[in-house]
Each structure stands twice: as C-alpha cells, then as structure tokens.
Image (cartoon, rainbow, N blue to C red):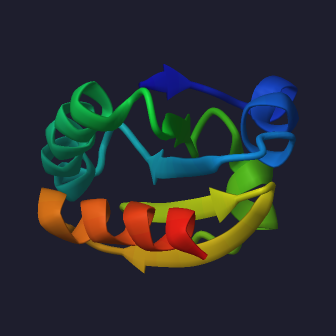
Amino acid sequence: MKEIGESDFQSVVLDSEGVVLVDFWATWCGPCQRQGPVIDELSTEMGKQFVFAKVDIDQHPNLAYEYGIEALPTLMVFKGGKAVEQLVGMHDADQLRKSLESAAAE
C-alpha cells in the first residue's frame, strides 16, 4: 500500500482509470491501527487489480477537509478518478473485497 499526500493524490487517485481504495487514517486512531492490516492483506491479494493508498489526515488535513472526512477510519473507493463509495468505521476483508469488485463491475 502506498502512502500518499497532496502532492501525489492527483496522479495516484484522480488520474487513475481503474479502482483505487484510499484509507484516510491517523496514527493516534486505534480502529485505524486495526483496519490497516486488513487493507495490507487485501493489497497483497488484489494489488494487481486495484490500487491501494493511504492518507494520514494529520499530515494532509487539506485532503481530509476536501473529502469531508469526519470520522476515522474512512475508506473511499474511487473509479476513474471519481469517488463512488465511502465506508466509515471498521470493515472486514470480505466487505472491502465486495466494494472493490462492485466498483470494478460498474
């Protein structure tokens, strides 16, 4: 999974033709620490089909503001540079897999 910020959000997420999962998180967020390994596992399993990225909201507050991040963790699924789904809170691998596959099928 790739750590991104304001400088590369455009190229990694918005300019992508495919499906991108962005994990908005913070180091002090306990649920984020538990969600991270689930996303890492999916990234290893599905990294050839989808892009996985994470944004530390403390280091990149402008992105958090721009995308209306009010709770952590928040995961956003983008397709063709547009946000197609927002998932707030903890999600297991099956839920995330379904979200990614659903976005890819649309």
Q: Quadrant of the N terminus?
A: top left
Residue 61 percent coordinates (x, y): 71, 48
Depth check: give the residue in front, 102 or 37: 102
The residue that appears at 15% across and 65% down in the rendered structure is 94
The residue that appears at 25% across and 25% down in the rendered structure is 44
Left or right of 51: which side holds 42? left
Does 81 sit above or below residue 98?
above
Left or right of 89: which side holds 68? right
Residue 89 percent coordinates (x, y): 29, 73
Quadrant of the image occupied by residue 75: bottom left
Residue 59 percent coordinates (x, y): 63, 33
Q: Residue furthest front?
A: 105
Residue 58 percent coordinates (x, y): 57, 41
Residue 71: tell me if it is visible.
no
The residue that appears at 77% across and 41% down in the rendered structure is 16
Residue 58: tell me if it is visible.
yes
Q: Quadrant of the C terminus?
A: bottom right
Does 84 sit above or below residue 11?
below
Depth check: give the residue in front, 20 or 5: 20
Tally of marks: 0
Left or right of 90: which side holds 66? right
The residue that appears at 16% across and 45% down in the rendered structure is 38
Left or right of 2: which side holds 11? right
Does 52 sit above or below residue 81?
above
